[in-house]
Image (tube, grey):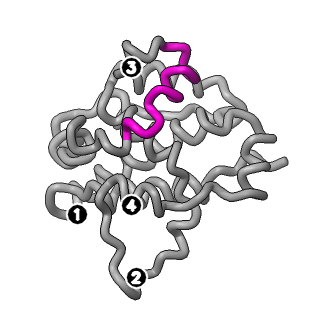
Amino acid sequence: MSADLSSVIAATAQWLQRAYPAERGALSAALVEAQCRQAATVAAWLRYPTALDAGLLEVVGPGGSSYLDWAGGVRVEPGEDTAWRTWVDEVVASWAVCLLTDRELARTATATVTGSVHAAGLDPDFRRLTDPDEHDRRAAALLRHPDLVAPVADLHRADLASRLGIPAAEAA
């Protein structure tokens, strides 16, 4: 079975970018894209830790963004291309925003996935997620604001804490 999660990672990162857009300009947009991509990658690797899990995802699909759109207050414009939204994974998006708003949680998560089947033969660099600089934080002000992302983060925060072996009270 394939361990390719690229469709889910790309679609979920795109959803995050649209739900919590960059503050301004092309550089900010690129920084937000990198942070979303890194957060969605770590979250997807945690959510689907084995090649079998990833293979099953390819068969059944991730569920789409409908509930996330509602929970996050995202408005989908009539006539907008929405095919990519079918590959958005609600749990991956929720976990990604949890990681983006909590540096220690992000560090624990990246340490967990570094030795996973997905990272085999790679030397992943998740520093925009785990150690964002001032430009990263400014560009992703909406995305990293705990109160703004709470409706999405709170959907599956307890499951993320459980996956990482953290008591739920510490992850809140």
| Residue 121 visible to the viewer | no
Left or right: 117 in relation to 147: right
Mark sitting earlier along the chain (4/3): 4
Q: Amino acid at mark 4?
A: Asp
Q: Secondary structure at mark 4?
A: helix
Please tell me whether the stretch drawn in magenta is mainly helix, strand or loop.
helix
Q: Which residues are magenta?
A: 153-166
Residue 27 in percent (x, y) is at 22, 57
Q: Secondary structure at mark 2?
A: loop
Q: Amino acid at mark 1?
A: Ala
Q: Secondary structure at mark 1?
A: helix
Q: Is residue 46 above or below residue 18?
A: above
Residue 69 in percent (x, y) is at 39, 61
Q: Which residue is mark 3?
A: 171
Mark sitting earlier along the chain (2/1): 1
Tag of residue 26: 1
Q: Which residue is mark 2?
A: 80
* Residue most extreme to the right: 1
Tag of residue 69: 4
Residue 156 is covered by the magenta coloring: yes
